[in-house]
Each structure stands twice: as structure tokens, then as C-alpha cells.
């Protein structure tokens, strides 16, 4: 029999090939990502060498592509069966087999196993006990569904597997966070895309078990039941279990499994049906149209003493169900998991790994690999399979092997590029954001900031030009020789591109330089977003005075700014030829500094900013504010300030526009500061968007509202962590006097600072004096170069605005002009 195996699980992916060839069959292995399975090994060093052919089409989730790859085989030497061990590929494989005239699982049954909501509907129609459930398409819908069902709830992707993004949520904030993670997942790998729909289910308390079956000609054979050992909530990763499990009510569990398979029309193949044994009896969790994953096929084979993969292949080739014989054996499994997240520093295999009864022992991580505390089944580092006459003996032996296996985890090696000083990378209660027990930090910063690095928190602190990627690469190579680098971090806007360039050069995870250009280069940004249908003002890259003059013919005024500017630095409004001449050199180049510039239409409308926490382009939480004075006012040393919007239509317009913009930047996770114009007609236009926390009083205001430091939120994705939606720290129902925020930046006149007085009010969140008395103060270079930053709170826009103005009026800044006498002091 010639068998085409389309994709496989990644744990011992070629075991099916080996078993089938040993049984006398020919195997063709089909994958769009061979490297995923080989992991750097040459084919001759794996059991894939036994395959007759290896086919590598561009995609394997599309039936047309699969058919094009397999049709020559079917028309030539012949093909007897097409099957897969990968859940995301079951539908494409069934459709391909149908078009080739080969045995296959009923198409509708496969569709139901791949859509957990539709499966639930079918099971409900058949009267099969299961939890209450709702299908949702957004975080807000998921929260509403959870409130209707009742807490706690399970939140999961409708088409997921391996427990990825499955979690138990006990409140609205947790539901919102879980839902955002589901929506952020766009690809499963191997050409499989995510549906990005959320299933919210009633949480069922009780042991989790599964029923393993084979089906042929509509008849179901129960191979046995499996019990489970799970990690604590919220993730509940599978850590172990026994097969076949001797469970009370085994007949009822098996009968319910058969009924569920009949309800969805499952007529051919292996199935893995999960249930919870509640106080009211078994309840279906889900029906999976494939064999249980990970090392479980080896567990089944050990207890049944038969090649389970061959049984599956032969029923897809038209054969009947196998005849099982009693073996008197129970197989146990325990997973190896990292004690904490970090880099695997050492592995000491168990001295009991070759003991009698240990059937299989595998460590699937190598020294140097990054490992995680278990969040889903893919975080497991290995497993041990034991066999014994009783479940207790099998469990005990597996636990002994796991407990004597040492996985030593070292700190991740990170390089932090900084311009703010290391004190900024501490939480409000003084804890370092980069936990020294987890991260080995090399800091590159300015010379005058070196003394902020605590040796207990930073392994090495060096002064260098952090904006020059070439020099940085050399400095990093020298500083980390023999240690290597795992991640490069940056929060400051002007360091985002150098950090991305370093990642590209060093082959490290994180946004690339090409991606970060879209959040730094204003021309690239607007080219990309306008092409995606995002409204922007008319703009052009400036190569000479002609573009500015041409745009002035169509608009009463234009804005000219450097394409890489920040904080409104070097931004000018030009209204006529005289205005152009004020800042252009004789050749017409703005400022004569040689850097690239952008000219764009001056928008005569209000300016707003929306500050967001984002995961993979999905906005988890956002706060919108109206500028009372635009940032360019700093050039006149006028106070720059903004007030958060209340519950009004403008806020919804801005938040929706912000979400649409971020959807076009779906690779980005972190913090964004998005400035948006609103025209007189109420139309939003993109001003610009930055991939960093906003300045002024935005950070303390956000922390007041959500108890989240935006610097820490910006760092976490760069460390490989998933961001979640924060719960509101203040709410009108519990904090009626402080539900909105406002901020201001105040500037001193040039001279020597002689006095700074800031008011004290209960509604002032933060009054930050950034200059010391006696310090020389010049003209601000950018909007953030203020002397005092204020952040206030209030119950509504009117009150918070009034409080902001009161705080500004009661802030006193005095300087003395610089004279020859004062300069000599």
C-alpha cells in the first residue's frame, strides 16, 4: 500500500514513516516546511530516509495545492491512502482524498471538528451534555458572553489545538485579556491561518479525561480512556496521565464518546474526545478528529503492544478495525517542563532513564535553547513513558524519572539600548523591570547616565553612541564575547531603528529594521498606511523647494518636518514663499542639514492622541485625548497640554480609526503613541504613529488608569512575552472623582533657573520637576524638553480641564537672564 502522509505532529514526526515501512507499506511524506521536522539534521540521520519520496508544495492547507502535488502519484504508480496527523490539515487532506477517489473522513465531520462552535451546536442538537457556550468576535463580545454564562469561563480559539491561547478567566479583565490573545494569533504555521474567533464556555470543575477511538465504516472502536495531570489554572497544560485508565463510569464515558462521534458524522479515522467528569456526570469538552498529540501515540502503542500508526494508515487504505488483545499493561507518561523561563544552561538526564519499565525517555530541548514555564503543550521540554502492570506503578516510575532529571535554566542575555537612564526601568515600587534573576543585562547608555546602573541589576554598563548601529554592533560583540546575546531591547524612539538593525545583523527575534521603518520614517509610514486605505493628509517627500511650492499652490499652508523627527522637533508650518525662505538654504533644502524631509498638507482641525497597548496589531487597551495646545507650541515656549476624552462619539471615532491603523501593522506588539487629526467634517486623518510610549504626562496618566507602566509594556514583547489587556484601576463606579486624566508640559524662559514651585492637590497624579534650581535652561529642542510635567485626574472632561488649568496657573517657574556676571558665578 502506498500512503501519502501530509504533515505530522512535530514530536517524532517520522515514526509513522518507520512503522508503515516496517509493516511493508510505501510512504510519501508531504510538507511545506521540511525544516520544521528536521531541525537541522540531514535526512539520512532520520527515519525520513525510509520514505519513498518527500514532496514540498508551497502550502498544505489548500486542497488545490495538495491535489497538484499528489495527482501525479495517483495517476502514475498509484496512491492508496492520504492522511495527516496535524489537526490544522485534516480538512485539506479529506478534500484532496475525496477528489482522488480515496477513503476519507466525511467532509462535514472534519469541518465540525475544526470549528468548535459548530461542533457544540451539533452536539447540543443531539442532546449530548456539554457546557454552556457562546461564539464571539471581539473582546467586548467575549466579556458580555462571559457575564451571561457566569464566571469562571474558558476562553479559547474556535479552531485551535495544543491548548494554545486556552485559559480560564475569573473576571471581565481576564476575559478581555484572553480574548485579545486569541484575536492576535493570525497563523498556526505550515500555511495554516487562524480563524480569529473566540469561543467562551462555562468552566466545568472536575477531572479531565479523554476517550481514544478508531473509526471505520462508521463503527467506533474505543482503544481506551486516558486520565490527565494538569498544571494549575489558568493554562492547565497536560503534564501526564495513564492509559488505559481504570475510571469509574468508564462505560458511560465510552458511550457518550460514541454518541458524540455519531452526532458529528465522524465515519473514518482516529479521534481524541476530551471530557470533564463533573459532579453531574461526564461533559464533552471537544471532539478532535485526529490521534492525541505529543508523545501520546507511543503511550497507546506501549499499552496495546501494537503499531498504532499502522492501524490508522490501514483503515484509511480501506481496511477494517484492528482486533485488540488484552496485554495486562498500563502505560504512564510524564512531561518534562522548565522550572522557569530562561535559557537552558545544563541538562542532566535521569540516572533511572534505563530502568526496567522505562519504555521511552526523550529530552527535546538542548543546552542554549530558550525555554518557558508551561503556558501550552508546546512549552513541554520532553517526556518519559513507562509501562507497568498497574497505573500506580507506571505513574510512580515516571515521576521518579522526571524528578531526577535536571533542567538548569540560566538567565537570558539581553542588551538594552538606553537614553533615559536605568532608573527609568524600574516599577513604581522600585523593582527592576528586567528581573536580575532572569535577565543578564548589558546596558549601553550615555556617559552621564552610567552611574544609574546598579551592579546587582546590570552585569555590564558601557557608554557609547547608542544611535550608531555599526559602532554598537562592534561594541556588543566585544562586550559579550563568549556569552552571546539573546535579545536587543529599546524603548526610546530614536533607538528603535538601531535596535532593529542590530537584531537583523545578529539574527535575533523581534521587529526588523524594515518593519520599524513603518513606525519611524514618516514617508514609509504614510506610503504603507495610505496604500491600505488609511486616510492621511496629502504629503510628499522633499528633495528640493519645488515640492513645497507645488503643495502651497493647493493648500493655504503646509507642514515641513524631518521624516525621522520626534517630539515635534524641527517641524515648521509654511504659509508662503517668505516662510519657506526663513528656514531653507539657498538650494531650498530645509534647514540646510541634509536630512530627509516630508511636506504635507496643513490640516485645520483638532489634534488628538491615542495611546495604546497592542499585541500583534490588536489593540488591547487605548486612551484617547484632545490636545488643548498642539505640540509645536513648544517652539514659542507655550505650555503643551491635553485632556482625556470622556464617553462621547469623538472618542469612539478615534478608537476605531486607531484600531484600523494597527490592523495594518499586525507584526507589532508593544506601546504606540498615535496622533490623529479630526477635520471640521469629523473625518479622522493620520498625523503620525510611533512605536513607543507617549511623552508629557501620558505615562503617569496611563498608570493611574490601568496600573501599567508603559515602559514595561513596551519591553515585554521584546522579551518574548505576550501582552494582555489590563484591568481598569479606577472606574467611575468606585472612583467617581478620578476617572479621566489630563497632562501638561511647562517650559522655562532661557537663563539660570532660580525658582520652581509646583502645587500640591489630591487630584494631581504627578508633578515632575525635570530641572534643578541653578541649572542653565535654553530654548527647548523638542516638545519633551519642559521644566515641569503635570498629570491630573478628574471625573469628567470639564472638571479635569479646569483642574489642569488651575495646576498650570499655580506652577511657578523663574529664571534669571544670563549676564556676564551670572555666567561667572
Image (spheres, grey):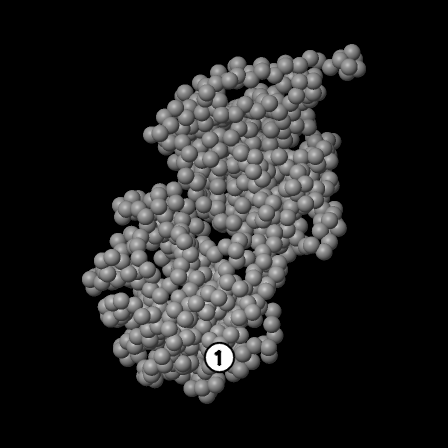
Label 1 residue SS = helix
Q: Nearer the viewer, residue 138 or 434?
A: 434
Who's the residue at 56% across and 80% down the image?
49
Q: Residue at x 38, y 76 (%)?
A: 389
**Image quadrant in which you'd find residue 344:** bottom right
Which is more toward the observer, 172 or 430?
Answer: 430
**Is residue 555 left or right of 141 when viewed as pictured?**
right
Q: Quadrant of the C terminus?
A: top right
Q: Is residue 290 visible?
A: no
User: Residue at the spot x=58%, y=27% of the render?
Assistant: 632
Among the 4 quarters of the image, the one containing residue 781: top right
Query: In x, y percent, where is residue 51?
Result: 52, 81
Instruction: List the residue tagged with mark 1.
Output: 17
The quadrant of the rendering that contains the N terminus is bottom left
Q: How many marks?
A: 1
Does residue 392 appear in the picture of this structure?
yes
The image position of residue 546, as x and y in percent, is: 65, 36
Assess disc 1: are there few (<14), some (14-19) or many (≥20) residues with their C-alpha within 10 Å of its C-alpha.
many
| Position in image of residue 419 (x %, y %) | 66, 36
Seen in the picture, residue 519 relative to 649 is either above or below; the reply is: below
The residue nearer to you, when weighing 674 against 373, is 373
Q: Position of residue 256 (x, y in %)?
A: 24, 67
Q: Which quadrant holds residue 715? A: top right
Q: Residue at x 38, y 69 (%)?
A: 392
Q: 459 left or right of 622? A: right
Q: Is residue 429 left or right of residue 656?
A: right
Amino acid at each position: 500500500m502506498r500512503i501519502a502522509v501530509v504533515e505530522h505532529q512535530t514530536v517524532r514526526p517520522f515514526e509513522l514513516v518507520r512503522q508503515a515501512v516496517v509493516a511493508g507499506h510505501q510512504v510519501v511524506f508531504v510538507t511545506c516546511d521540511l525544516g520544521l521536522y528536521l531541525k537541522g539534521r540531514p535526512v539520512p540521520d532520520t527515519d525520513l530516509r525510509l520514505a519513498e519520496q518527500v514532496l514540498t508544495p508551497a502550502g498544505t492547507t489548500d486542497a488545490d495545492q495538495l491535489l497538484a502535488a499528489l495527482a501525479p502519484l495517483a495517476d502514475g504508480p498509484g496512491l492508496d491512502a492520504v492522511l495527516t496527523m496535524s489537526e490544522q490539515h485534516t480538512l485539506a487532506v479529506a478534500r484532496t482524498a475525496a477528489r482522488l477517489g480515496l477513503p476519507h473522513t466525511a467532509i462535514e465531520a472534519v469541518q465540525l471538528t475544526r470549528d468548535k462552535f459548530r461542533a457544540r451546536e451539533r452536539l447540543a442538537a443531539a442532546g449530548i451534555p456539554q457546557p454552556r457556550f457562546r461564539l464571539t468576535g471581539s473582546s467586548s463580545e467575549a466579556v458580555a458572553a462571559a457575564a451571561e454564562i457566569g464566571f469562571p469561563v474558558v476562553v479559547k480559539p474556535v479552531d485551535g489545538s495544543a491548548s494554545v491561547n486556552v485559559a480560564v478567566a475569573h473576571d471581565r479583565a481576564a476575559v478581555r485579556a484572553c480574548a485579545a490573545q486569541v484575536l492576535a494569533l493570525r497563523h498556526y504555521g505550515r500555511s495554516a491561518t487562524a480563524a480569529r474567533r473566540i469561543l467562551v464556555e462555562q468552566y466545568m470543575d472536575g477531572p479531565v479525561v479523554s476517550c481514544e477511538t478508531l473509526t471505520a465504516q462508521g463503527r467506533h472502536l474505543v482503544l481506551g480512556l486516558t486520565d490527565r495531570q494538569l498544571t494549575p489554572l489558568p493554562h492547565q497544560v497536560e503534564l501526564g496521565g495513564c492509559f488505559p485508565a481504570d475510571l469509574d463510569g468508564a462505560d458511560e464515558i465510552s458511550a457518550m464518546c460514541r454518541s458524540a462521534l455519531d452526532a458529528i458524522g465522524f465515519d473514518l479515522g482516529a479521534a481524541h474526545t476530551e471530557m470533564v467528569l463533573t459532579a453531574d456526570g461526564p461533559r464533552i469538552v471537544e471532539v478532535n478528529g485526529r490521534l492525541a498529540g505529543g508523545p501520546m501515540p507511543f503511550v497507546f502503542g506501549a499499552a496495546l503492544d501494537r503499531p498504532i500508526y499502522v492501524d490508522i494508515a490501514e483503515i484509511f487504505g480501506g481496511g477494517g478495525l484492528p482486533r485488540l488483545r488484552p496485554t495486562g499493561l498500563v502505560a504512564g507518561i510524564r512531561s518534562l517542563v522548565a522550572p522557569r523561563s530562561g535559557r537552558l544552561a545544563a541538562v542532566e538526564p535521569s540516572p533511572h532513564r534505563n530502568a526496567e519499565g522505562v519504555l521511552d525517555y526523550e529530552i527535546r530541548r538542548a543546552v542554549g535553547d530558550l525555554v518557558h514555564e508551561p503556558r501550552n503543550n508546546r512549552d513541554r521540554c520532553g517526556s518519559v513513558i513507562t509501562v507497568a502492570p498497574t497505573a500506580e506503578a507506571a505513574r510512580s516510575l515516571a515521576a521518579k524519572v522526571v524528578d531526577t532529571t535536571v533542567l538548569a535554566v540560566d538567565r537570558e542575555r539581553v542588551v538594552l539600548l538606553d537614553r533615559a537612564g536605568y532608573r527609568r526601568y524600574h516599577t513604581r515600587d522600585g523593582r527592576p523591570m528586567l528581573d536580575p534573576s532572569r535577565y543578564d543585562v548589558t546596558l549601553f547608555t550615555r556617559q552621564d547616565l552610567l552611574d544609574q546602573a546598579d551592579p546587582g541589576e546590570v552585569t555590564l554598563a558601557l557608554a557609547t553612541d547608542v544611535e550608531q548601529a555599526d559602532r554598537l554592533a562592534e561594541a556588543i560583540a566585544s562586550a559579550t564575547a563568549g556569552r552571546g546575546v539573546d535579545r536587543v531591547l529599546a524603548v526610546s524612539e530614536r533607538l528603535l531603528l538601531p535596535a532593529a538593525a542590530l537584531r537583523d545583523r545578529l539574527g535575533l527575534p523581534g521587529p526588523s529594521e524594515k518593519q520599524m521603518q513603518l513606525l519611524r520614517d514618516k514617508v514609509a509610514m504614510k506610503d504603507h498606511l495610505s496604500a491600505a486605505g488609511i486616510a492621511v493628509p496629502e504629503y510628499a517627500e522633499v528633495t528640493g523647494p519645488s515640492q513645497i511650492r507645488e503643495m502651497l499652490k493647493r493648500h493655504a499652508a503646509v507642514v515641513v518636518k524631518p521624516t525621522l523627527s520626534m517630539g515635534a522637533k524641527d517641524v515648521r508650518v509654511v504659509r508662503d514663499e517668505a516662510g519657506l525662505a526663513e528656514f531653507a538654504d539657498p538650494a531650498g533644502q530645509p534647514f540646510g542639514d541634509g536630512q530627509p524631509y516630508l511636506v504635507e498638507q496643513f490640516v485645520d482641525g483638532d489634534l488628538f492622541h491615542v495611546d495604546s497597548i497592542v499585541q500583534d496589531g490588536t489593540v488591547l487597551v487605548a486612551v484617547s485625548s484632545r490636545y488643548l495646545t498642539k505640540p509645536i507650541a513648544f517652539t514659542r515656549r507655550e505650555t503643551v497640554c491635553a485632556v482625556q476624552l470622556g464617553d462621547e462619539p469623538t472618542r469612539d471615532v478615534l478608537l476605531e480609526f486607531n484600531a484600523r491603523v494597527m490592523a495594518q501593522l499586525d507584526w507589532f506588539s508593544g506601546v504606540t503613541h498615535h496622533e490623529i487629526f479630526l477635520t471640521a467634517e469629523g473625518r479622522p486623518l493620520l498625523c503620525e504613529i510611533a512605536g513607543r510610549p507617549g511623552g508629557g504626562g501620558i505615562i503617569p496618566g496611563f498608570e493611574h488608569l490601568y496600573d501599567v507602566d508603559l515602559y514595561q509594556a513596551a519591553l515585554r514583547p521584546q522579551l518574548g512575552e505576550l501582552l494582555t489587556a489590563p484591568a481598569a484601576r479606577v472606574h467611575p463606579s468606585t472612583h467617581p472623582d478620578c476617572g479621566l486624566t489630563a497632562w501638561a508640559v511647562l517650559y522655562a524662559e532661557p537663563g539660570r533657573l532660580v525658582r520652581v514651585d509646583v502645587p500640591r492637590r489630591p487630584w494631581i497624579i504627578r508633578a515632575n520637576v525635570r530641572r534643578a534650581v541653578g541649572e542653565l535652561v535654553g530654548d527647548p529642542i523638542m516638545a519633551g524638553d519642559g521644566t515641569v510635567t503635570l498629570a491630573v485626574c478628574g471625573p469628567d472632561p470639564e472638571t479635569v480641564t479646569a483642574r489642569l488649568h488651575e495646576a498650570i496657573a499655580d506652577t511657578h517657574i523663574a529664571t534669571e537672564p544670563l549676564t556676564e556676571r551670572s555666567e561667572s558665578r
